[in-house]
Amino acid sequence: MRPLFPAPIRERSRVTRVWLIGAMALLGAATAHAGQVGSPKPAPAVGYTLVSRETIEARLGAAPRNNQDREPAIESMFEQAGCKGSDLVEQPVKHERFPNVICHVAGSTDSTIIVGAHFDKVSRGGGVVDNWSGASLLTSLFESLHDRPRKHTFIFVSFTAEEEGLVGSKFYVSRMTPDDIARTRAMVNIDTLALGTTNIWLTHSDRKLAGAFYAVAQSMKLPVAIVNADHVGNDDSDSFLRRKVPTLMLHSITNRTFHVLHTDDDNLSAVRFGDYYDSYRLIAAYLAWIDTVLD
Ligand SMILES: [Zn+2]
């Protein structure tokens, strides 16, 4: 997540108030759209493997303190989860020290679902919630989904240099051909989970994908809210939005927890593990679900 801090203090209070109005509204608007991609069966009917709490917690707790260690750490986590050989590739990014890390899972069609989460952190703080919570979860989501044949080709991308201006995701998108864009049915971006229950940044999301997410959450009896942060931040979904790829942006920030970002407070003590594990279960079920309902 990239917080945008307006320079004049008077501006900041105004902008914060704008965001307050947008935040915390329940996802009523999206329910009307849920039917467009079909009403989900109860989550257990959608097949995926649930990774244990212990593993999810251990992967989150292993957050390296600097970017130099993060890139190899995310690769070895993917390998341990079973993504290896030619399925796991580094994409060098122009002028960047660290590459994007990409794990491919071929489906029965070339229709594609991209799941993204940046691995880099700012120098201050532990970068546990922003965004080891997302990057490490990619490896568990891979593990959850690669247990059986899927219709869609899944591409898990851990982006580099998000904090420097969405550099890794901009580069990734710049290398997508018009065909790549056309066959991408969804890009689900995960940035800054674990501060609380799951939120959708609706202005960075496709309404149908958001509606389906809400419907899956309902069926699992898990909470989800809309929290838009347009005036205070940005994230890698923006790079895909600019090429008109349908996106879903998931996070856990609220007004109460926004102060954690890019500070010394971003460490394991900020984590609400029960909420984080619920977010994991919800996203895993959602990805398995949209694999069956998207074309
Ligand atoms: Zn950030």
Image: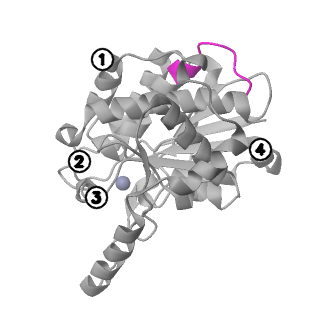
Q: Which residue is under mark 2?
A: 266
Q: CA distance from mark 2 to mark 3?
A: 10 Å
User: Is residue 268 shown above or below 245?
Assistant: above
Q: Which residue is under mark 4?
A: 180
Q: Which of disc 1 and disc 2 is earlier in sequence?
A: 1
Of the residues tagged 3 and 4, which is closer to the observer?
3
Rendering quarter of residue 195: top left
Asked whether disc 2 touches disc 3, contact meaning CB atoms under 8 Å apart, the reply is: no
Name the residue nearer the viewer: 260 or 195: 195
Q: CA distance from mark 3 to mark 4?
A: 35 Å
Q: Does the magenta-highlighted stretch encompass residue 103?
A: no
Q: CA distance from mark 4 to mark 1?
A: 36 Å
Of the residues tagged 2 and 1, which is closer to the observer?
1
Name the residue nearer the viewer: 91 or 236: 236
Instruction: Answer with left or right where residue 142 lies relative to residue 195.
Output: right
Residue 263, image x, y percentages: 21, 55
Q: Which of disc 1 and disc 4 is earlier in sequence?
A: 1
Residue 242, image x, y percentages: 65, 62
For the record, the magenta segment spans 142-153
